[in-house]
Image (spheres, rainbow, N blue to C red):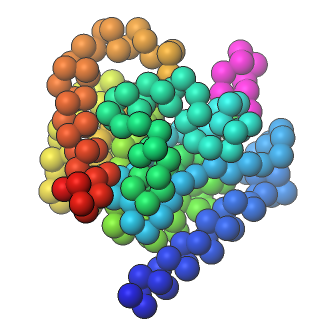
Amino acid sequence: MAESCRESGELAELVGAISSCRICVEAPVSKPLPHEPRPVLQVSTSARLCICGQAPGTRVHKSGRPFTDPSGDRLRTWLGIDEDVFYDKNRLAIVPMGFCFPGLDAKGGDLPPRKECRQTWHDRLFTLLPQVELVLTIGQYAQAYHLGSERKKTLTETVTNWRDYLEDETRSPAVLPLPHPSWRNNAWLRKNPWFETDLLPVLRGRVAKLVARPSEV
């Protein structure tokens, strides 16, 4: 119990530091963040499932809550869970590669996640989440961090080989790569019907077990 309280205290302290982080404004790697930082994440010392995506978009930046957009609706459908489970930090953690909305590029698309987040916080944060059993890596940036040199040359190739990562018993936590649930990937989903027929049933089965309360098992 004492060890659990200590770990919980360390995590709360780190989350507090992340929540007040201004590195990308005051000491940026390149151009400073073009707006006030608003870090968004969801963690606890009990969640066994972790979603690791790219970075908040404009809607999430406004709400301060992860995946409060159509991508979040599709992601919850993929996972087979409702908002009550999704936003229960004791059951599900959400750790994007960039904690703040990075801004828009010249074409109106989201910029890549800020490098400062990964360099400053991610290793320290995941050290305090040893109970996580499965990480869902959404997009190339999350896959690069969690899979390293084992990531394939393209996102499609990485996701196509999802069983190799999920069933690798030497990997802890297990990793399951996913495409981004954005509408921009509708064409990808149509071209890869195996994602819905083969991957999603396995994903939902794993998720159901990991987010279940002890009384539900």
Pick the residue in front: 106 or 21.
21
Q: Which region is colored magenta?
A: 103-110
Taking the view exactly as shown, the residue that stands out farthest to the bottom is: 2
Q: Main secondary structure of the magenta part?
A: loop
Q: Position of residue 167 (x, y in %)?
A: 15, 47
Quarter of the C terminus within the rendering: bottom left
- 179, above or below 64, in the image: above
Q: Position of residue 55 (x, y in %)?
A: 59, 40
| Residue 146 in sight here | no
- Determine if the magenta segment contains residue 169: no
* The quadrant where residue 10 appears: bottom right
Q: Residue at x 17, y 25 (%)?
A: 198
* Relative side of 22 to 100, left or right: right
Q: Residue at x 31, y 9 (%)?
A: 191
* The quadrant where residue 58 appears: top right
Q: Position of residue 23 (x, y in %)?
A: 76, 58
Taking the view exactly as shown, the residue that stands out farthest to the front is: 215
Pick the residue in front: 35 or 155.
35
* Relative side of 33 to 57, left or right: right
Q: Residue at x 24, y 60 (%)?
A: 215
Q: Position of residue 123 (x, y in %)?
A: 49, 64
Q: Residue at x 70, y 60 (%)?
A: 19
- 126, above or below 190, in the image: below
Quarter of the N terminus within the rendering: bottom left
* Relative side of 163 to 158, left or right: left
